[in-house]
């Protein structure tokens, strides 16, 4: 699963597991008695989502959504559309959107704006990673695992050209590896 383009481990398995448990404990505490639905933003968040929901000690519903950005390149171009919508009605429910990374903020800004029109009781965002220095639009996650510098990261769900999603930790990629 590793190759010569993987540079170094940025966040270890142990750190991810510890931080995920902390976030799950906060969510468990804050959503007790609520109708909580957790939505995985595919594909990158799938690994984090699978670990996070198994640490939440509440009855929850789960759903998935796919957002696609127009334009080529390694960054979000500025225009995002929903290419696969959620299955369930979220009106009156407490919603947590789960992401792997907040980069420019464009994806989550768009998704939260769209989902907010469907009358959820509340709508929050949980992201494993956050790169605040890359923001193009004003957006803050409610539950954030790690703030990271502006380095290209792969692993634990994050890809480069669909590779490396199965690495068990978050790693940096060598600049020449991209
Ligand atoms: C990544 C990531 C977020 C988005 C963040 O998805 O999973 O959804 O980009 O970037 P932004 O804050 O600049 O909008 P990507 O489009 O790479 O798809 P993937 O989840 O299928 O890897």
Image (cartoon, grey):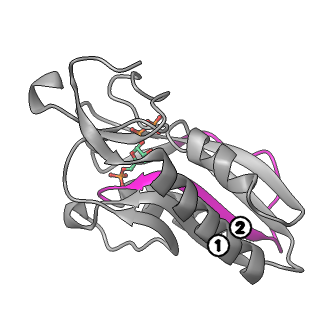
The magenta segment is 82-104
Q: Label 2, secondary structure: give it.
A: strand
Mark 2 lies on residue: 95
**Side (left or right) of 28 relative to 65:** right
**Side (left or right) of 83 relative to 27:** left
Q: Residues within 10 Å of mark 1 (few under 14, many from 20)?
A: many
Q: Quadrant of the C terminus?
A: top left
Mark 1 lies on residue: 123
Q: Of the two numbered discs 2 and 1 on the same chain, state the one appearing first in sequence.
A: 2
Q: Label 1, secondary structure: give it.
A: strand
Q: CA distance from mark 2 to mark 1?
A: 5 Å
On whether residue 101 falls in the magenta region, the answer is yes
Q: Residue at x 15, y 31 (%)?
A: 174
Q: Residue at x 20, y 65 (%)?
A: 133
Contact between marks 2 and 1 (CB within 8 A): the answer is: yes
Give x and y (percent) for residue 152: 23, 42
């Amino acid at each position: 699963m590793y190759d010569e383009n993987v540079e170094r481990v940025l966040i270890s398995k142990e750190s991810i597991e510890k931080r995920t448990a902390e976030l799950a404990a906060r969510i468990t505490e804050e959503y007790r008695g609520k109708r909580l639905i957790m939505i995985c933003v595919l594909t990158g968040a799938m690994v984090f989502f699978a670990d996070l929901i198994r640490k939440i000690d509440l009855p929850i519903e789960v759903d998935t959504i796919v957002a696609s950005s127009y334009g080529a390149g390694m960054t979000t171009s500025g225009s995002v559309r929903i290419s696969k919508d959620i299955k369930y009605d979220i009106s009156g429910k407490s919603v947590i959107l789960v992401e792997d990374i907040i980069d420019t903020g464009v994806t989550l800004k768009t998704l939260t704006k769209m989902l907010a029109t469907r009358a959820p009781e509340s709508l929050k965002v949980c992201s494993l990673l956050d790169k605040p220095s890359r923001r193009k639009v004003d957006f803050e996650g409610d539950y954030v695992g790690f703030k990271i510098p502006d380095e290209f990261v792969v692993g634990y769900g994050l890809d480069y050209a669909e590779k490396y999603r199965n690495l068990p930790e978050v790693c940096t990629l060598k600049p020449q590896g991209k």
